[in-house]
Amino acid sequence: MSVSFISSTNIGSHTHVQKKLQRHKRQPESFAVKSGHWKPISRAVGVRMSGQTEGQHKMSRKIGFIGGGMMAMAIADGLVQQRKFSKDQIMISETYPPRREYLLENGWELVETEKLVRECGLAFLAVKPHDVSKVLKSLSDVGTTKADLVSIAAGVTLSTLQSCNPQFNYVRVMPNTPCLVNCGASAVSADDPELAEKVRDIMSAVGIAVTVPESQIDAVTCISGSGPAYGYVFIETLADAGVMKGLSRETAKALAIQTVLGAAQMVKQTQDHPAQLRNNVESPGGTTIAAVSI
């Protein structure tokens, strides 16, 4: 995928942006880049967005999570909230006692891992990367009726998963931490297109989900996997600058958060290239052009 950047010449006026916002404010969408143009991501191939489901997920079997950590439970909560699965259709395997207690107190069904993979149609492998091999090798005798496994372990390839236990079908997913607030951006990769589509639909419960070849998972990690940290650094730095200029920490933080959120919404809703939107803020000889030129 290539991106052609728009130069500052022929950039639309502020009025142009206002018209775009008016045109799109009733249909907020995410946008993808293709051939130098920005188009709604919900219309792009291989993308599904949160909320794009019609009632309960049509699966006769349960869904499971091997590991009940924060990311796993963010996905599980999203599935319930989006009505893809009911809570009693979700099984969880967790070994850490304090976490087990927390999950039980919140009404989740806890089972042994072997039982989970036998009774679920799909199961998320949500353990630390260094535990993946041990968990998979412990499931060598689960029988012929078993779940397809979705790994969210960073850096563990499909071939590595297969070498650990070849009796399962595998999918790789690269989620990110905003999944915890249903604003995630996840990438799905699998050798089986039908299975990849099923998992993409599930991941849309916690944000947007795209399908990519496994060879592009590292690129996804650079953008959406690590990207939230870049955003946090920018917000922190912007707020610090406000404090240095005399604003209270609370005020500076609130302004910095809303500014970044607003900028993202401008890109999302107008379809304008970020360079064009930036240019609209940069008055000739003004403070903004001076700052971005440093």
Image (tube, grey):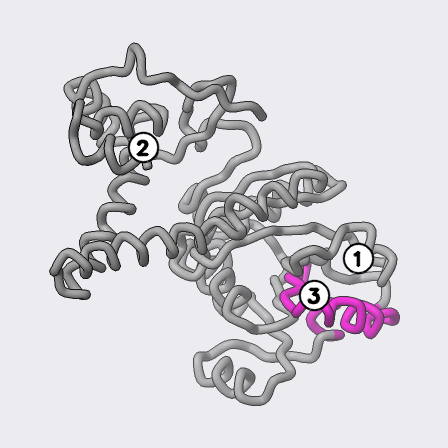
Q: SS at mark 3?
A: helix
Callout in the foreground (2, 1)? 2
- Tell me where residue 154 appears, x and y as whole percent: 65, 57
Front in this rendered view, residue 272 or 78: 272
Within 10 Å of the Cα at label 2, are there few (<14), some (14-19), or many (20+) other Cα atoms?
few
Quarter residue 136 falls in = bottom right
Residue at 19 percent across and 59 percent down: it is 244
Residue at 32 percent across and 17 percent down: it is 8
Please name the residue that numbered disc 2 is placed on: 293
Q: SS at mark 1?
A: helix
Residue 129 included in the magenta stretch of the image: yes
Placement of the C terminus among the 4 image quadrants: top left
Please name the residue that numbered disc 3 is placed on: 129
Residue at 18 percent across and 35 percent down: it is 287
As measured in the structure, the alpha-carbon distance from the residue carrying label 2 to the one carrying label 3 is 42 Å
Please name the residue that numbered disc 1 is placed on: 161
**Bounds of the magenta segment:** 114-142
Q: SS at mark 2?
A: loop
Q: Amino acid at mark 3?
A: Pro
Q: Is residue 43 left or right of residue 257?
A: right
Within 10 Å of the Cα at label 1, are there few (<14), some (14-19), or many (20+) other Cα atoms?
many
